[in-house]
Image (tube, helix red, strand yellow):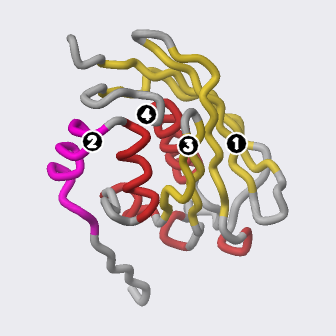
Amino acid sequence: MDRTRTYGWADPVELAMAARTTDGLEFSRRLASGEQGPTPIFATLGYALTEVEHGRAVYVGEPGEHVYNPIGFVHGGFAATMLESAAGSAVHSTAPASTGYTTLDLSVHYLRPITGDTGPVRAIGTLVNRGRRTALAHVELRDPADRLLAHATSSCMLFPPDD
């Protein structure tokens, strides 16, 4: 093997504790600024939260060989993971402190192939609806020319602090 990749991440237990003590928007802003993180998944796949506001989150990732499938394209799991992260962060940005969430489902539609030559891709997540127990978000994955590469919807289950 002639290719290697080395990276590091923040302690996930410390990240989880910080997430429980701040509201979702503040915690997400700390991730975007670099004050918290990177999370293990961000570091492993090579993407980061770059923008966040109430009900909206943007991730940017640089697809490279480390996420290729055996036939020379970026694995769909890379795109799906970025899409899921943006959807979850859009939902989390609306949550009060101590509110947890998890993905119930993720429906992805792939429209264009992604390679290392695609350049940095952006996953833009937007909250569609938030109830007491569930939330729905829509996400788009775009290339540097703003072409739509994939899009998804995601439902999240919310765990309010009073449960």
- Sequence-wise, which precedes: disc 4 or disc 3? 3
Q: Quick check: is 85 in the magenta stretch? A: no
- Percent across and percent down for residue 46 are 47, 66
Q: Residue flagged by tag 4: what amino acid is it?
A: His
User: Mark 4 falls on what kind of element?
Assistant: helix
Q: Which residue was labeled with disc 4?
A: 92
Which residue: 17% across, 43% down? 17
Give the residue displayed 54% in from the left and 43% down from the top: 86
- Residue 7 lies left or right of residue 123; in this view the side is left
Q: Quickly name the residue at label 1.
A: 140
Residue 6 lies, with reference to residue 143, above or below; the image says below
Identify which amino acid the numbered label 1 is placed on. Answer: Glu
Mark 1: which secondary structure?
Answer: strand
- Report which quarter residue 63 is drawn in: bottom right
Spatial CA span between label 3 and label 2: 16 Å
Closer mark to the observer between disc 3 and disc 2: 3
Q: Circle 2: is it few (<14), some (14-19), or many (20+) Cα within 10 Å?
A: many
Q: Magenta segment: does it hold 19?
A: yes
| Dot placed on the residue nearer the N-terminal end, 1 or 2 | 2
Amino acid type for the residue under numbered disc 3: Glu
Q: Give how far apart the Cα atoms at labels 4 and 3 are.
A: 10 Å
Instruction: Name which of mark 2 and mark 4 comes first in the sequence.
Output: 2
Mark 4 is surrounded, within 10 Å at the Cα level, by few (under 14), some (14 to 19) or many (20 or more) other residues, namely many
Q: Nearer the viewer, residue 89 or 23?
A: 23
Sequence order check, earlier mark of 1 and 3: 3
Residue in the foreground of this view, choosing between 67 and 25: 25
Count the marks: how many?
Answer: 4
